[in-house]
Image: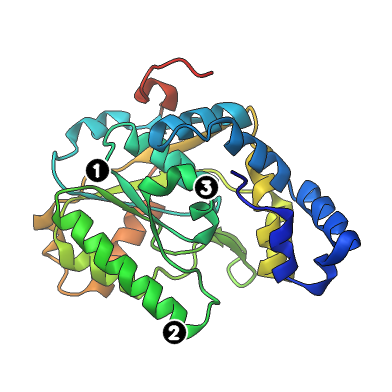
Amino acid sequence: MPVIDAKEFEDLSPVFRGKMGQWFAKFAMRACALDKINQVCDHSFNYSGAEFTKRFLNDVGVNYKVGNAERLKLLPEGAFITISNHPYGGLDGVITIDLMAGIRADYKLMANNMLSRIKTMKENFILVNPTGNKKNEVTRTNLNAIRETLAHIRGGHPMGFFPSGAVSDFSVKDLRIRDRKWQTNILHLIHSVKVPILPIRFFDTNSAFFYFLGVINWRIRSLRLPSEVFNKREQETRLAIGDIISVQEQEKFTDSDSLGNFLRKTVYEMPEPASFIPGTILRFPEKVD
């Protein structure tokens, strides 16, 4: 099942309608590497969860390394939350599920429509709408997502968040790459559930061309995301595991804003570990087809 089909482009613009329009849509898919994403996902459509992500990463040639991996042995048996920066806008979600669902199969990640298109990973997602949808639609979908998330955590299961809700971008004002402001509703949810929190930091970024497109227009930048998966082939993406933040430590913060500032600082100021180990060591060892 394709992640996106050329016929779907018809809803984006009249330019993609008719015989010539569909030819142009297929050309656009090739130019944006959407056809490659479809091929990779189709290769492993019979798998789900960490089994799918293992094959996906193998097919696209992406490896990742984990620093402070020994801290994963300290994860509680019940509910906990992971928080991460969001540098890639898709690939970091796949890597997070590969890492965490390989340890806890009941791990879910709050994700937007982009990741949710990978149907074989549906069991690992709770869907929210990205910024820019109509207000009533966002409210309805996101309220349902909040309810589902609360039920998942209160049922004793782990949950992951990219609190920014969007891929990191380049700030012209600060002249650096950073997450946008972390979402108030997510921070309020994290503050309310009172479960241990595991910080995760990704140390690498997308290409300079990706951020250049973002300065022009975020929609144009979004079309670049599939290509950003494949340009990391044979690279070793680095991420590190932080110290678990206990419920007792969280109780020092009386509101979600102060807790959110602390959590963001914890992620962004996490030092780069002296050494990393391959993520494949932490995954289940079944042979990749």
Q: Is residue 273 at all visible to an observer of this figure?
A: no
When asked about the image quadrant of residue 96, the answer is: top left
Q: Kindly report the distance in space between the C-alpha atoms of the residues bearing marks 1 and 3.
A: 31 Å
Circle 2 residue: 136
Q: Horizontal and vertical percent for residue 99?
A: 38, 35
Circle 3 residue: 118
Helix, strand or loop under label 3: loop
Q: Which residue occupies 29% across, 44% down?
A: 107
Q: Is residue 112 at all visible to an observer of this figure?
A: yes
Q: First in sequence: mark 1 or mark 3?
A: 3
Residue placed most toward the observer, 207 or 47: 47
Q: Is residue 250 above or below residue 137?
A: above
In this picture, residue 157 sits left or right of residue 242: left
Q: Residue most toward the right?
A: 20
Eye-nearest disc, 1 or 3 = 3
Q: Kindly report the distance in space between the C-alpha atoms of the residues bearing marks 2 and 3.
A: 25 Å
Three-letter code, disc 3 = Ile
Residue placed most toward the observer, 49 or 206: 49
In this picture, residue 286 sits left or right of residue 132: left
Q: Horizontal and vertical percent for residue 213?
A: 73, 62
Circle 1 residue: 243
